[in-house]
Image (spheres, rainbow, N blue to C red):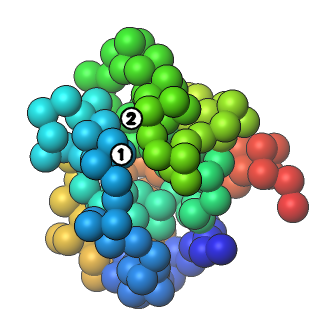
Amino acid sequence: MWNPGLNNDHLTLREVYDDFIDRYHQEDIPWQVKWVENPHYKLALSGAVDLYTHDCIHILLGRGDRPDEETFVIGATMGSDPNLKAWEIKAYRWLSRYFYPDEYKFSYQDLFMFNIGIYTARAMGITNLSEIHFKKYEHCELGELRKKLWVNSDLLKAVYSRHYPS
């Protein structure tokens, strides 16, 4: 289990990412997931990002790699996209539950956190995360980057303490 948490404001994005990079590689991701979540596919939904950007969003939001954390990050990414449509939310929920390969399918509880991610991103008013070019922020401290992108660590901590009990 990997979880960057939110108590790392003094570290740069690159420092935390370097601890994270051995998790997955683009070629390991099944085509069904890429088709829905990667912007290089014409049928990708709003908020679609490449794996590097997705991993940086995990770090920015302080969420790890459990399925419910994964869906929170995907929900926050999609929820930060002003072009997100209601049908895309429904489509993602169905596709990730029934179309994805077994090891990538999400449970109802995981998809509850997807909804929480959408609402949390909208409540913070964060920048469209799918359009952030994280390479240019690699040497930025996370605390500074979170402020720049309107990521409210206090709100995230409150959401996490309620939905991710220790």
Of the numbered discs 2 and 1, the one sitting upstream in the chain is: 1
Circle 1 — which element? helix
Residue drawn where x is 45% and y is 40% of the image: 100
Residue 94 position, x and y percent, is 49, 23
Q: Is residue 105 left or right of residue 159?
A: left
Judged left or right of residue 97, residue 163 is: right
Q: Which class describes the residues within 10 Å of circle 1: few (<14), some (14-19), or many (20+)?
A: some
Discs 2/1, front: 1
- Alpha-carbon neighbours of circle 2 within 10 Å: few (<14), some, or many (≥20)? many
Cα distance in 3D space between marks 2 and 1: 15 Å
Q: Which amino acid type is marked by label 1?
A: Val
Image quadrant in which you'd find residue 46? top left
Q: Which residue is mark 2?
A: 78
The answer, for residue 112, to whether it is visible in the render is yes
- In the rendered structure, find residue 33 and report the number of the disc placed on it: 1
Marks 1 and 2: in contact by CB < 8 Å? no
Instruction: Tell me: 30 left or right of 123.
Output: left
> Relative to 94, is 72 above or below?
below
- Residue 112 spot, x, y in % from top left: 67, 31
Residue type (three-letter) at the residue carrying disc 2: Met
Q: Residue at x 72, y 50 (%)?
A: 160
Number of labelled discs? 2
In the displayed image of the protein, which residue is found farthest to the right? 166
Residue 81 at x, y percent in the picture? 31, 32
Query: Where the N terminus falls, by quadrant?
Result: bottom right
Measured from the top left, where is residue 41 in percent x and y? 15, 40
From the viewer's side, name the closer residue of 52 and 6. Answer: 52
